[in-house]
Image (cartoon, helix red, strand yellow):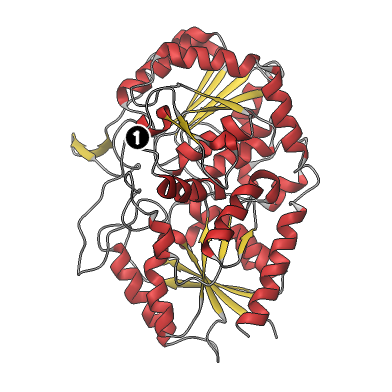
Amino acid sequence: MSQEICILPFFGTGHLLPCFQLCNHLTSSNFHVNLLISSTLSTSVPSSLYQHPLFQLTLIPSPPPSPEHHYELAEGLQNILSNYHRPTLPVCAIVDAMMSWSINIFQKFKIPTVAFFTAGACSASMELAVWKAQPFDLKPGEIRFLPGLPDEMAVTYSDIKRRNHNPPPHPPPQHGFPPPPFGPGKKGPPKDGEEPPWLNETQEATALLINTCDDLERPFLNYIASYVGKPVYGVGPLLPEQYWKTSGSVLYDSDFRWNRLSSVTEKEVIQWLDSKPHGSVLYVSFGTEVGPTVEEYAELAEALESCGKPFIWVIQSGSGRPGPPGFGLVEESGSSKPEGYFPHGLDERVGSRGMIIRGWAPQLLILSHKSTGGFLSHCGWNSTLEAIGRGIPVLAWPIRGDQHYDAKLVVSYLKVGYMVSEDLSKDVGKDDIVMGIKRLMGDEEVKKNVEVLSDKFRNGFPRSSVDALHDFKDYVNKRFV
């Protein structure tokens, strides 16, 4: 009889997608997987998961995300565990690191927990190393090496100066329950000299699963494991199964991701890309939750107009406002409309050279097309993985949190991209962007580096991650059964 594991994901898109793939891998390892998910997210679960006999979905009744959301989830989770549907409780629970509040609930039922990081190992290890080194007294031109990490990741004065902008709304606690977290911990991103929240809040977890692999982040996985003194498994990149089976060909997002509102169809995107020369298109997207300021968006529009390169620009409703889409709505003529930046008139001025997509874009399709030659990205971890896996160099424009460390990994350690600006303590301007685009799209060395790295993923899911999942299965069977 297969052992049962329950999984509790965070509700952001960048957390759900890797979680679904982890479910696939675990069921393939003969675990019975019970995915515990908010009832508001039931339609996001891919139909392919339901087809596996070892997969089960349990909905936690809860309202849409709000200050009450976490409280309702906690209450619902406790009720589910109190009235569990099977003869025995799960042997363990895999908990997204941003849901670490739930560890106390699982402990009440004597269910051991494993922490799941949907971000990479670099960001977590850099937070830890910076906290240990306290390099906040750096002067211009100085650097501080971080013992145990690659020299390329040394902290610079520019790293210390950089700012986080567009922070998410942070509603007050309700019913004594902690507010939604910013990053891997509940307290928000660590301030200078402050212990990384993830370190304390995963202290009761018996092991860590991280969405990465040895080929990308071996030194960082080793660094975390040596410090926390518990098993750390690199089980990624947790990308769709189709991603690993379509190397060298276009990948259609609609085949495995739920449909969302968009101003274009995949067919229209394909036809536009087919009309452009090989490797000529710059893809611009900041994901669904963060982005530059309104003023920086205007600078970006001018840069794309003047650079002369074909481009696809994905822009969300409410761009430029603090917080993710859906917050900050205003009433106008009796209807709700998100305030934000939009480059009105740009499409007419650039003509067929540019494609502006409002809403959702088929990112894997765009990154896997031969005409795409660069990616201007916020360096969210999923976007970073998808670009590297398809051999696309990155122009990094990190906005907050782990994105800054992902960008440093891309630029300094992996050497597969450039920073959009060397000084992110101030607004990014048109000249910075234009120069960054020219460097990225014209640098053959960077293109070669990312092609060499992407070759490691052309034969399917990384061997090291297959081994890590096997080791994790042995760990569960020996430790919990």
Q: Nearer the viewer, residue 86 or 359?
A: 86
Amino acid found under the numbered disc labelled 1: Asp
Q: Residue at x 20, y 38 (%)?
A: 330
| Residue 164 shows up from this direction | yes
Q: Quadrant of residue 348?
A: top left
Q: Quadrant of the C terminus?
A: bottom right
Neighbour tally class for label 1: few under 14, some 14-19, many 20 plus, Cα within 10 Å: few
x and y percentages locating residue 159 in the rendered image: 42, 32
**Residue 231 higher or lower than 105, as above or below:** above
x and y percentages locating residue 95 in the rendered image: 48, 67
Q: Residue at x 30, y 70 (%)?
A: 72
In the image, taking residue 135 as reference, residue 330 lies left or right, namely left
Q: Nearer the viewer, residue 268 or 218?
A: 218
- In the structure shown, which secondary structural element does the residue marked by tag 1 occupy? loop
Q: Quadrant of residue 446?
A: top right
Q: Quadrant of the N terminus?
A: bottom right
**Residue 420 higher or lower than 259, as above or below:** above
Q: Quadrant of residue 39?
A: bottom left
Q: Residue at x 61, y 42 (%)?
A: 385
**Residue 108 higher or lower than 400, as above or below:** below
In the image, taking residue 361 as reference, residue 468 lies left or right, namely right
x and y percentages locating residue 334 in the rendered image: 18, 39
The residue that mark 1 highlights is: 137
**Residue 433 higher or lower than 263, as above or below:** above
Q: Nearer the viewer, residue 480 or 441?
A: 480
x and y percentages locating residue 191 in the rendered image: 31, 46
